Image (cartoon, rainbow, N blue to C red):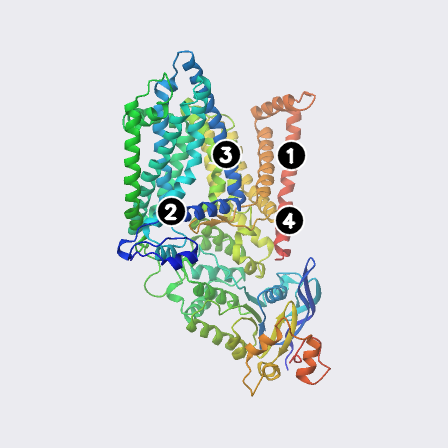
Amino acid sequence: MSDPAIVAEGLTKRYGDERAVSDLSLSIPAGSVYGFLGPNGAGKTTTMRMLTTLTAPTAGRAEVAGVSVTDRSALTDRVGYLPADPPVFDELTGWEQLRHVARLHGIPDDAADGRIERLLDRFDLLADADRRIESYSTGMCKKVGVVGAIIHEPAVVLLDEPTSGLDPRAARTVRDMVAELASGETTVFLSTHVLPVADELADTVGVIDDGCLVAEGTPDELKARSVDAVDGEADLESVFMDVTTDDRPPATERDVRSSGSDERPAGRLAESP
Amino acid sequence: MTEHGPTPERATDSGLGRPATSGEGGTRPDAGTALELARVDVRRGGRWALAQDFWVLYGLLAAVGFAFMGWVSFDFGRTAGQALAAGESTWLLSTGAWTVWGVLWLFAVGLLTVDAVGSNGDLDADGYYLSVLSVPEVAGGKLLTSAAKFTPFVLALAVPGHVGIALGAGQPLALVGCGVATLLTIVSGTAVGYPLGLALKGLVRRSATLTRLKPLLGGALGVAYVVVMFSGEFTTVVARIEPVLRTPPLGWLGDLALVTTTGVGASPTGAAGALVAGVITAVTGTVLAVPAARYAWETDRARPADDGEGGDATPPADPVGRLLGATPVGQSTRGVAVTTLRRVARSPLQLLFAAVPLFAAIPLAEQVLATGTVPWYAPWLVVWYGAWAAGAAVPLNPLGAQGATLPALLSSPASGGQVVRGHVLAAALPAAPLTAAAAVGVGVLGGQSPPELAAVGVAAVGVVVAASVLAAGVGTVFPRFETLDFGNAREAVPPSKVAFGVFGTALSLSVVAVAVVVDELARDLVAVLLTRSLPLHPTVGPDAVVTVGWVVLGLAVLSVPLAYRTAATRLDDYRL
């Protein structure tokens, strides 16, 4: 197994008395896809912001691509981040937006233009690249955001709902791109509500609920251990519904019941891979 | 589009309470539905305004302005009423009231026309409203909304004067004519202005050229309005059209307003004419509002041709980027500068905030044009404004202006220093040469000596650059992230009020310091002002003023690197 690209130990974020993320521990190998699931407000975005230095943890530590998340200047070149709200300026054209991002990363214009053209073509945006983003659909904005997140070829890419608002063809392109990134050296941290996407792409899936990681494992492991699994028909939706329900039993009890072991860390259905 | 109304059941569900009417072909518009639409529209408008500090402030200032005008109007009216009681007459009761009512009616029509052409003539949820309600109902609702919105303006301007007349003359009945005239002005003005605006909106929507020119035409109209109102030319315009204002049918409004005031000599025939003409105008306008609304709302909008249509795109032209690329400016700094300039050029709404002080300069410009002499301080005023505008327009809110892209900026390798330099470049590149040229030009017109002109020119460039750095420092300490909604999807993120205040104060002190150090007249003036205004009135000589000026200048100079360091650190360390 290769060295982990993302490591977190006891990562916690509190806003006053409210705990957004609580004691989160992760170990994600380089070159893998980590599917990060959870209900709205569960702490997914806060976690991603902590891993990209945008939010300072209240407690715990984390390293991304070997760099502490407290060292922004060292980390920025190694991560790409797509927030749920595409980070684009309406006043710019798609190409201008991406050239801006490339310049922020210090990429010379000539090299940037080559990458921009290739990626825009891949996302079927090349014909619209000199139109202003204010005329783009939600999906087109999202595509520009995705390209902006990977244009500097980072070691770790964190994508927050990259397929929301995309039509099936564009969503397919994003899924292919994620798979292609992971087939190389890139690690992808993928937050999504589209469970089949996580099922298809993720090597490991983590489910966060109310700030706590309540399940983690490969999609097959989670499905097999889901309490709703009957005759192998369980899917990630069953897992999700099971581990995020309000009336679920305490995590430790569930762990014991699903694995038959009392050695697993609290709050997890499965060991980290 | 096919018109149809909701079934009674659906209407009941929606809360619009439409009663059962005749079949589809003969569905009658329901006044209750229009009233409900207007009620919701007015409530939404109020909440929209109250939720935004800028509009609350604007509303307060407008209220103060209207209160002042109302007091002036009341005072005029009371004087006229007292004169009437004494058997005399005044301008107001002999001719003025007729002119005022004519102006008021035209003012209401003009404002309502502009209102309808703009975003207030749009339907927020047209796909919903036009599919479940008839156009007459929706148009009726919009008419009522407009009438409700403009009623306070008419009331504030018209009623205090007549209250003054009634009190001064001891004739309470005088208010009856005023009340009827006010109502007629609101109803007929709305019925003319709003449909006219809708028709113009329909015309604009059908023309790609007019659609493209609309912001420009709107801006020109706004500037013309401000110039006329602030330059004192309004009275000239009114004097030009006075004969029309006092001639029927507009002149009848004055008769109606004063017909219940004994001793003025208002024509009862004119008053009756006003009533008849007003009712006919109101009914006709309301009926015509329906086809005008259809013309505006039921059309495929003409769209200006996209630049990029046809074939794959190529790398965009980037003259500023190329220019900066030939300098030692780093790639990230260049990216921030180019993008910031592009955004300002393509969405100049934020320049509005920087344009506000220009209104105050209109009287000065008029004085210069009238007297042919330029005051000694005019070039320094230009320097102050150029520096203030450069700072306020671009770098005064570097965090908030990023909008949704802030996470991308913060998680990029661009350092805080590079981002600050990019913003300062974006501000200074256009503002420094423009300010220097304008200040020196004004100085030349004022007959200043070459050394003075050189000082002004050099100071202009230096102050603009320094002010931009200062603005970045202040803006990162006092950022604002809330967008200001101008309606019709037009938004801007202005700097915070605290940032405006701190930046404006610091800049003003700095420019005054430069002025007293460089200019003898300035230091004498400041010395006199300080002597008069300081507690115990100590004698402050020009030499002391220069000393203080140097101290302030020293602090100002020190504040620039401090502001730069603060801004860079804040950007480097900023967390969401």
The 10 Å Cα crowd at callout 2, few under 14, some 14 to 19, many 20 or more, is many
Tell me which residue sits at (64%, 67%) in the image: A210
Measure the C-alpha gap from mark 2 to mark 3: 26 Å
Of the residues shown, which amino acid type is indicated by label 4?
A: Thr
Q: The residue tagged with tag 2: helix, strand or loop?
A: helix
* Horizontal relation, residue B310 to residue B530: left or right: left
Q: Earlier in the sequence, mark 2 or mark 4?
A: 2
Asked if badges 4 and 1 are on one and the same chain, I answer yes
Residue on which the image places disc 4 = B566
| Residue type for callout 1 | Val
Q: Do pointers 2 and 4 mark residues of a single chain?
A: yes
Q: Quadrant of the N terminus of chain A?
A: bottom right
Q: Is residue A92 above or below residue B264?
A: below
Q: Amino acid at mark 3?
A: Ala
The numbered mark at residue B297 is none
Same chain under badges 2 and 3? The reply is yes
Residue at disc 4, secondary structure: helix
Mark 2 = which residue? B141
Q: Please state the horizontal and vertical placement of residue B420, each as a whole percent of the image.
A: 57, 51
State which mark lies toward you, 1 or 2.
2
Binning the other alpha carbons within 10 Å of mark 1 as few (below 14), some (14 to 19) or many (20 upward) gives some
Q: CA distance from mark 2 to mark 4?
A: 52 Å
Q: Nearer the viewer, mark 2 or mark 4?
A: 2
Query: As rendered, which of B428 and B51 lies closer to the eye?
Result: B51
Please name whichever residue, A257 or A105, is drawn nearer the observer in this view of the structure: A257
Query: Alpha-carbon distance for marks 3 and 4?
Result: 39 Å
Task: Quickly name the residue at label 1.
Answer: B552
Report the amino acid beneath label 2.
Gly
Circles 3 and 4 on the same subunit: yes
Can residue B313 be spotted in the picture? no
The residue under label 3 is B63
